[in-house]
Amino acid sequence: MTSPLLRALRVARRYGDVEALAPTDLELVAGETVALVGANGAGKSTLLAILAGAIDPSEGTVETHARVGWVPQRPAHYSRLSARENLELFAQLENVRDARAAATQMLERFGLPDAQRPSGELSVGNRQRLNVALALLGEPRVLLLDEPTASLDPGQRRRVWEVADALRAEGGAVCFATQNLEEIEHATRTIVLQDGRVASLTVEEAFG
Amino acid sequence: MSAVFLLVRKDLRVLRRSPLLLGALVAYPIVIALLVGLVAGYASAKPRVAFVDEDNLPQVVSVAGHSFHIQTVIDDVAKQVALVRLTEAEAARELADGKVVATITVPTGFLGDLETTVVSPHLILETGSGGLAPRVTQQVQALVYQLNQKLQGGYIDANLAFVRLLLHGGSGKFVGRQFDVLGLDQTEKELATLPPSKRVATIANFVRQAKEGLAQTGEALRATANPITLKQAPAHGRTWLLSAQVQSYGIAVTVTFLALLLAAGAMAAERDEGTIGRLRRGLVSLGQLVWSKVALAAVVGLVLGAAIAILFGIVVEAGGVTGGEPWARLPLLLAGVVLAAAVVGAAGTLLGALAREARTASLLAVLIDLPVVFLGLVPRGAVPLAYWISLFLPFAHAVRLFGAALYDTSPWHVVGVEAAWLVGIGAVSGTLARLGARTLSS
């Protein structure tokens, strides 16, 4: 049996009395793409953020056996820095050997402007592409995508899925959250979340 | 490169890209230094005071056998104010216009009263209605005190002349009347020629006691004139106290405001930008994140503190303020500034973590800064509770540390104690900020 690249054991998250995510188990193994589907507030983003290590679970643990890249739902970068400056900074934080070269590669790969223009002034699409590029800086084997194509045009969406499919093909794993049923075709496995719990529902039933 | 260094460099770059904030940061030390310099300059300046002579004082006045050159006396005693001779009308006009802050009038009959040595003449002081009035009143009181001290010698000598007349006899003049006095010496001799008797012995005894008593009159008069004298303790300061104090307050206010504001804003901005989640994914620990904001505050505090100290020094030197600027103490001062800014930065980081939103954090920082500064300004004896509260806040310690660094000949004890307080406050704030930072990414 293939050992998991990432494993979540009984992870849960509570905000006061509100249970955002009930205890949940999840494994990501090499070569699979997992789709998390569910309505707003179902717990998809919370689960992905916990898997990424961006927030601590209230209980449970996450075992990580590979480098993980995370694309949060809202673009997360320093808006007063340019796209290149953001990429170089996070590459340095990721201990990438040649941060400048890595930034140049990402700028070219995602067609981002290499100018001093603050990233906060970029178009919504460019900011989302920068968001994805930042996640790929450390050459992760696991990619966690939180509604990554929500603000992208069809061409940009295709490019994102090309990146995700390539990573899976190279022995990585992808887990993405979506409300777009058409995107489920990229998944090898689908998990439906409802009210913070894994539900035994069909995708159609989840969006009721 | 360390994560802390990378984040500090990022925050400084972000700061540089915020024109309005950068402009405020550049202008702030200049404005503070100029204001502080003006205050220091004002503190050493002599207010202009009109001198109205309605009694037509002669150039030389004789009091009790002593001659006083009026202008020389005025120049000599007017160390606190600049006296300007004006007519009554000119003085009234200039006081109304604010060109002079007060008028001192020598009324008609002043010299006559003075020369009698038995009636106290009076000067009339009129101050403007501005905020300087209390200070001018104090300065004129000091001037009159010094005039009185000069006149005391003459008065005492005049009184002693009468005592000598009583002792030794001779001719004298009092309130315009000429008279002859036998004197105790001659009385004693006259008594010696009388046949001995109990009554003569009693009178001779009284004369002897009177002579002994009167012989002490000189010292007694001087003691009566100055029951308490003030002696200045040997100066332990290396530069002028007031100058050092205003500079300490200027730098402490700047550092407290800006370090708190910047650290709070920078910390909360990590959540606003959504980058806190990225950083927490093993790239930067919460401790490193807190340290980066503390370091940011320290760096900016150092730059601003140095700018204020240098600009202030230039203003002080150019204005010829008493004491000058203690340039040799600049390294010690700046070391204190770095510490104080870091400690305030730790508190700001806590604030930013709790506020979770940059605008809220900035507003809170301003709202908190004001009472923190005011608490630090309350003297210990005035409101003890305020003093005790201020002990646990960095501002008062920063002021005392800066003041000692600039002023004290041996600053190490005060610097050590205040630095220890600051380190303690910083450690508590930093620990709480580290705990508070956990809420940022949730």
Image (tube, coloured by chain):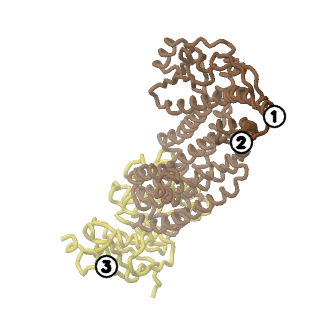
Which-is-in-front pick, marks 2 and 3? Answer: 2
Q: Residues within 10 Å of mark 3 (few under 14, many from 20)?
A: some
- Quarter of the image with the N terminus of chain B in it: bottom right
Which residue is labeled 3 in the image? A22
Is disc 2 in the same subunit as disc 3? no
Image-based side of A74 in relation to A136, left or right: left
Question: Residue B405: x and y, percent?
Answer: 67, 50
**Residue bearing mark 2:** B327
Chain under numbered label 3? A
Check the residue under mark 1 and report the chain it is in. Answer: B
Q: Are circles 2 and 3 on residues that touch, CB within 8 Å?
A: no
Residue at figure coordinates x 60%, y 58% from the top left: B5
Chain A's colour is yellow
Which of the pair B182/B14 is nearer the observer?
B182
Cα distance, mark 1 to mark 3?
124 Å
Residue B83: where, in percent of width, then height? 60, 21
> In terms of depth relative to the viewer, which is nearer, A122 or B127?
B127
Residue B186 position (above or below residue A146):
above
Q: Which chain is brown?
A: B
